[in-house]
């Protein structure tokens, strides 16, 4: 049997790791890279979790360790370079154990892939057309150096030529080409500038007004690496990006960051001189399916989490390894191998799916046990047999039943990072609510200094429509949330419905890309003496259900915002003679009471009678 012949477009991290593993298993591999070897771009990347195990298996750990940057940690600085906080390496996600310059990592991986005779790396080569039939893919390759165009046939093709992959455009149907790129309204530039003594040992990060951020990391004695970021859409930057004109891009950035404080003027002077300059508007890539026939997508080309997550490299390495292992097992049925690769890897791309995919016994090791520590796993049926869901509750202070990063690689780190972002957003949402309710804009600040809100990862397993539409059944039945407010993140399956005025009439609240839904909770209703009404909501069948009449898995993440535990929620009256509609409640007792009630966990131990706690549904 002849060995399988595979084309890989893109010699980045994912492409070279794949070439290595397929080469090791005797595949004939042709890697096509449009740029030249010395033209590898990129700044610092982290390697962690399963990706670290993979490079270790490749025997590359020592070489990678020799090339790591030596950053002692990260300081937050003000406009005069005064430090107002430092986080040492290893204490946070900001400085990882293994941080390496992307071009250095790429060179190490490339050398490893190149060690096999039957791996052929071709630079300056671009795929300009492709055709596939049921058993092979024929691609037309343009070799820039030789000014030649040739056609070659392969058993399959793997596209991993980046976020804006042109090979992907040839593989996907026209309707999906642009729609898979999701802008996140954030632009970044990175480049190196001459080092100065203050650049080490700590990386430094400076926030300037107007959603601007400048960060610097120590690289070598000679150079430091700079990141500039604007966290909003900007027309000038957008036009400059579209023009592909580096002079114009540098000009737009100079206008934006010149005079912004800290070392921004030094940075701008350095940027004017630097050759290694990269500027990009950030996107995520999201696709329902990563393969078409004999062609498959890998790494950022298929699933780009955006560079801000720091996960792109790790997912690229992991994806390449998983794809190689499936192809080695099933080289004669690549379509099946592609499906298995996708099934396995999606768990890592969708972080909450990662937790729910472990065995039920393992999940139960992290079970929620105590209402006063509302944290841990709850299985399908725990909140009543009519609901069809499983949850993992996560808190920042009371978090004893959470798998650590060794038990479930990267899980806690990822959820933690997301949790902090939610907390910042939640406190800002509360501020807005306080302003509109004329309570004074720091009203909620005073009662959220040690707040321990609850992030809930929710999984609604795939289920037949007939099952969910039986009387008394839903994905989650109609209810109000019991905290102050809830930030609700949903995937794109749909099915959430809302009855904001408690009239019994529900309207659909479909997911809107890039938005977060905010529910008012019962505690806010009590606190505002009924001025703000808690949002009644439920999750039922989505408006469109596939021909098989099955509801697919649905994932959502509510973030329930609770005040400091000792807060007394005594209704605020604003009008003369206004009568309080609710008795005062202690925030912790309220939270415990409702948790116990929802999960049927033990008896109510408070002195108040049940009626004191209930909040009317109308
Ligand atoms: O999954 C959803 O969209 C809603 C979840 C929810 O309402 C809850 O967990 O309280
Ligand atoms: Fe809810």
Image: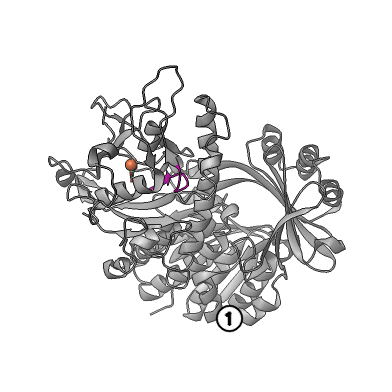
Quarter of the figure that contains the N terminus: bottom left
Residue at figure coordinates x 57%, y 69% from the top left: 16
Q: Residues within 10 Å of mark 1 (few under 14, many from 20)?
A: few
Residue at figure coordinates x 39%, y 71% from the top left: 326
Q: Which of 107 and 579 lies nearest the eye of the viewer?
A: 579
* Quadrant housing residue 310: bottom right
Residue 583 x, y percent position in the rendering: 34, 34
Residue 270 x, y percent position in the rendering: 85, 52
Q: Which residue is mark 1?
A: 117
Colour convention of the picture:
one colour
- Residue 129 visible here: no
Establish if 498 lies above or below 149: above
Establish if 4 lies above or below 357: below
Please, what secondary structure does the residue beneath circle 1 have? loop
Side (left or right) of 114 relative to 214: left
Side (left or right) of 250 relative to 471: right
Q: How many marks?
A: 1
User: Which residue is situated farthest in the top direction here?
Assistant: 576
Residue 33 x, y percent position in the rendering: 62, 62
Q: Which of 608 and 283 lies nearest the eye of the viewer?
A: 608
Establish if 283 lies above or below 358: above
Residue 409 x, y percent position in the rendering: 47, 69
From which residue to which does the magenta span run?
557-567
Q: Which of 52 and 426 lies nearest the eye of the viewer?
A: 426
- Residue 302 visible here: yes
Magenta stretch holds residue 45 = no
Quarter of the figure that contains the C terminus: top left
Residue at figure coordinates x 82%, y 63% from the top left: 223
């Amino acid at each position: 049997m002849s060995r399988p012949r595979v084309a890989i477009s893109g010699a980045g991290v994912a492409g070279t790791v794949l070439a290595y593993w397929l080469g090791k298993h005797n595949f004939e591999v042709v890697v096509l890279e449009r740029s030249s070897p010395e033209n590898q771009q990129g700044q610092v990347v982290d390697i962690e979790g399963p990706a670290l195990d993979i490079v270790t298996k490749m025997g590359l750990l020592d070489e990678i360790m020799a090339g790591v940057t030596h950053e002692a940690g990260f300081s937050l600085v003000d406009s005069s370079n005064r430090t107002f906080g430092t986080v040492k390496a290893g204490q946070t996600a900001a400085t990882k154990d293994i941080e390496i310059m992307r071009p250095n990592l790429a060179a190490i991986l490339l050398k490893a892939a190149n060690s096999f005779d039957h791996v052929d790396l071709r630079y300056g080569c671009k795929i300009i057309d492709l055709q596939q039939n049921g058993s092979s893919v024929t691609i037309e390759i343009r070799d820039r150096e030789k000014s030649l165009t040739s056609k070659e046939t392969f058993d399959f093709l793997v596209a991993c030529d980046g976020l804006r992959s042109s090979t992907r455009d040839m593989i996907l149907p026209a309707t999906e080409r642009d729609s898979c790129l999701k802008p996140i309204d954030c632009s970044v530039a990175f480049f190196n500038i001459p080092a100065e003594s203050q650049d080490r040992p700590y990386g430094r990060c400076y926030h300037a007004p107007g959603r601007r951020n400048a960060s610097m990391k120590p690289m070598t004695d000679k150079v430091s690496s700079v990141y500039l970021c604007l966290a909003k859409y900007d027309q000038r930057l957008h036009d400059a990006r579209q023009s592909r004109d580096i002079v114009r891009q540098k000009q737009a950035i100079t206008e934006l960051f010149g005079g912004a404080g800290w070392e921004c003027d030094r940075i701008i002077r350095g940027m004017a001189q630097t050759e290694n300059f990269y500027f990009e508007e950030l996107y995520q890539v999201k696709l329902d399916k990563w393969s078409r026939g004999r062609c498959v997508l890998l790494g950022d080309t298929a699933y780009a989490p955006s560079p801000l997550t720091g996960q792109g490299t790790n997912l690229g390495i992991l994806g390449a390894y998983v794809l190689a292992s499936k192809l080695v097992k099933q080289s004669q049925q690549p379509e099946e191998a592609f499906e298995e690769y996708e099934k396995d890897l999606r768990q890592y791309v969708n972080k909450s799916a990662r937790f729910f995919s472990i065995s039920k016994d393992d999940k139960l090791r992290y079970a929620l046990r105590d209402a006063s520590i509302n944290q841990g796993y709850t299985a399908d049926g725990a909140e009543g047999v009519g609901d069809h869901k499983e949850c993992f509750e996560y808190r920042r202070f009371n978090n004893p039943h959470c798998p650590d990063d060794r038990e479930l690689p990267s899980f806690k780190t990822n959820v933690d990072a997301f949790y902090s972002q939610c907390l910042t957003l939640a406190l800002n949402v509360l501020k807005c609510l306080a302003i509109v309710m004329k309570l004074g804009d720091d009203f909620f600040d005073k009662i959220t200094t040690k707040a321990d809100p609850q992030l809930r990862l929710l999984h609604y397993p795939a289920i037949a429509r007939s099952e969910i539409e039986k009387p008394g059944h839903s994905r989650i039945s109609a209810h109000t949330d019991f905290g102050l407010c809830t930030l609700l993140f949903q995937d794109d399956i749909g099915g959430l419905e809302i009855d904001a005025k408690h009239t019994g009439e529900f309207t659909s609240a479909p997911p809107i890309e890039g938005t977060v839904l905010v529910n008012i909770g019962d505690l806010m209703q009590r606190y505002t003496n009924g001025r703000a009404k808690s949002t009644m909501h439920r999750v039922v069948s989505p408006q469109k259900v596939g021909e098989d009449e099955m509801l697919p898995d649905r994932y959502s993440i509510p973030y329930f915002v609770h005040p400091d535990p000792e807060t007394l929620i005594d209704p605020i009256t604003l009008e003369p003679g206004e009568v309080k509609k609710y008795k005062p409640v202690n925030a912790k007792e309220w939270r415990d009471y409702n948790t116990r009630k929802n999960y049927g966990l033990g008896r109510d131990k408070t002195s108040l009678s049940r009626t004191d706690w209930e909040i009317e549904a109308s």
